Amino acid sequence: MCSINECRKGNRFLEFYLEILFVLCLFFPVLHIFHCLPIFSVQGENKKHNPTTQKGISILIPCYNEAGIIKTSINSMKSLSYQNFEVIYINDGSTDHTFRLLHEYLKLEPCWKTSNNSLPHNLVESTFQSKIYPNIYVVNKLNGGKADALNAGIEYSSKELIVTLDADTVLTESALTAVNNKFADEDVVAAGGMVHVLQTKTENPLSKLSLKVNMLLRVQMLDFLKAFYVTKVSLARFQGLAIISGAFGIFNKKLLVEVGGYRSSVGEDIDITLKIQKYITRKENKKKKIVLVSDAISYTELPETWKDLYKQRLRWQKGYIDCLVQFFPFLLSTMFTKSVSFFYIVESFVVAVLASYVTAGIVIYLAIGDFSVSLLSFVVLYLLYIIVFNFLYDLSAIRQVKRYGFTFEKKSWSRLLMTIIYDVTIHRFVIMYFVMYGSVAYFFNRDWVKVARTGRNYESESDIAS
C-alpha cells in the first residue's frame, strides 16, 4: 500500500492531468464555434473563378446490395445540370437484385471500356454502357469491398476529376458546377462537398430542410450540421481536414493514382484523406490544398433505427482508430508542424476518446473506491461541459447553416427545440458509448457491417420517415 504522502502526490498529479484535459475539452469547441464564423474566412475561400470550360468529372458509385436505393441514385444522376461528366456504377458482386435493376433502369449493353492498370482491384468480369444515358456505365466485378470497388472505378474512369458517392447519396442540380468552379484553382487537389440528411430533403434542396422525420433522424441531422458547417469549416480553414466524407468526395484523378488509391479498411475515406495530407507535406507540393466546397450540396440516407445507427457509428470509430494506427508515425512526427496531425491526435484522440475513458474510469472509481471531492468535481464539470457546449454547438450550427442559405420549414421550431434538448441530455452520451466501444472493438473485430437501406422513394415528398 502507498503511504499517505505518496497517495496525496498521486492525487495531485491526477488532478493536474484532469485540469489540463478539461481545458482542452473547453478549448476545441470554443475554437471551432468562433473560427467557423465568416470573419475568419481565409483568402480565396469564397472566390468565384467562373471558369469558361468544364473539367471532366467521373462520378464513381460503389454498389453492393443497393437494390433498395439504386433508382433514387439513377434519378439523381439524370438531373444534374452539367455536361462534361460520366457516371460509373461499380457492381461489387451484389447478391441481391442490384445488377438486374441497373439493367432494367439503364438498358445496359456490353461495351469496351479500357482500364489504366495502375491500381490493384478484384477481377472485373464485364463493363456496360446505358443505351438511354450514354454517359452512364456499369463495371461488374467480383466482390472486394468499397475501397476495392473505388480503385476499379478509378481504373475505368476517363475524366480529370473523380467524385466518389455512396449509392444512397444524391447530388443537387448545381453541385458539379460548384465543384468545377472550385477546381479552377489548380492548387486544389482534393475537396469535400457538404452533406445533408436525405430524409430531411425538401422540394427546395438548396434552401429548405424538413423536420418531419423521427427524433433519431433529427438528432443525426444536427450531428451533420455541426460536423459540416462548424467543425469542417473551421478545420478546412486550418488546412486540417482529416476526413473527406465518403458520401461526397472530390479528387484529382492523377493524385489518387500517385498515392496508390484506396486501402481496404473500415475507414477508407479517412485513409485516402490522410494519404493526400501526407502527399502535400512534401516540399514540392506545399502549395497544394484540400478544401471544403460549401456550395456543392448533397444528401445521403442515414439510419432510421438504433440498430443501424450502432452499426454505422461503430464502423466510423473503427475507421478512425484504424487510420490512427496506420498513420501514427506520420501524425506523431508532424503533430506540431501540420494542423491535420495536431487535431487528429489532440482533439480527436485525447479529447474525444481518452477523456471519455477517463471520465468513465473516475465514475467507476468513485462508485467502488475512495470518495474524492476533486474527482467528483471533474465528473460533474465534464458532464456539464458536454451539455452546455453541445447546446452552444447546436445553436452555432443552426445559425451557421442559415448563413449558407438554409432554413427550416415553418412551424418546425418546436421540433427543433425538442431535438436539441434530446441531443444534449441523451444522444451525446450514447455517442460517447459508441466512441468508447468502437475504439476497443477495432482490435478484436474489423468487419465492415453494412447499414440497411430503407428502399424509400424520395421522389415523393410525402414518402419520408416520420
Image (cartoon, rainbow, N blue to C red):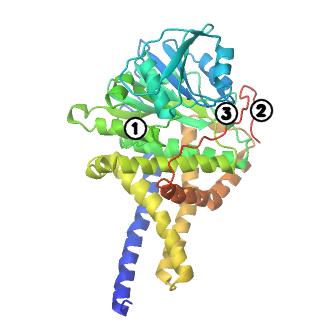
Q: Is residue 115 left or right of residue 174?
A: left
**What kind of element bears circle 2?**
loop
Label 1 – label 3 distance at C-alpha: 28 Å
The residue at the point 42 percent across, 18 percent down is 50
Residue at image mark 1: 273
The numbered mark at residue 463 is: 2
**Quadrant of the image occupied by residue 3:** bottom left
Packing grade of label 2 (10 A; few <14, some 14-19, many >=20) is few
The residue at the point 43 percent across, 23 percent down is 154
The numbered mark at residue 201 is: 3
**Quadrant of the image occupied by residue 411:** top right
Packing grade of label 3 (10 A; few <14, some 14-19, many >=20) is many
Instruction: Look at the image and tell me in which quarter the C terminus lies.
Output: top right
Q: Could you tell me the amino acid type at mark 2?
A: Asp
Packing grade of label 1 (10 A; few <14, some 14-19, many >=20) is many
Q: Could you tell me the amino acid type at mark 1?
A: Thr
| Viewer-proximal residue among 377 and 111 | 111
Q: Could you tell me the amino acid type at mark 3?
A: Lys
Sequence order check, earlier mark of 1 and 3? 3
| Viewer-proximal residue among 110 and 332 | 110
Instruction: Look at the image and tell me in which quarter the N terminus lies.
Output: bottom left
Whether tag 3 and tag 2 are in contact, CB under 8 A, the answer is no
Label 2 – label 1 distance at C-alpha: 35 Å
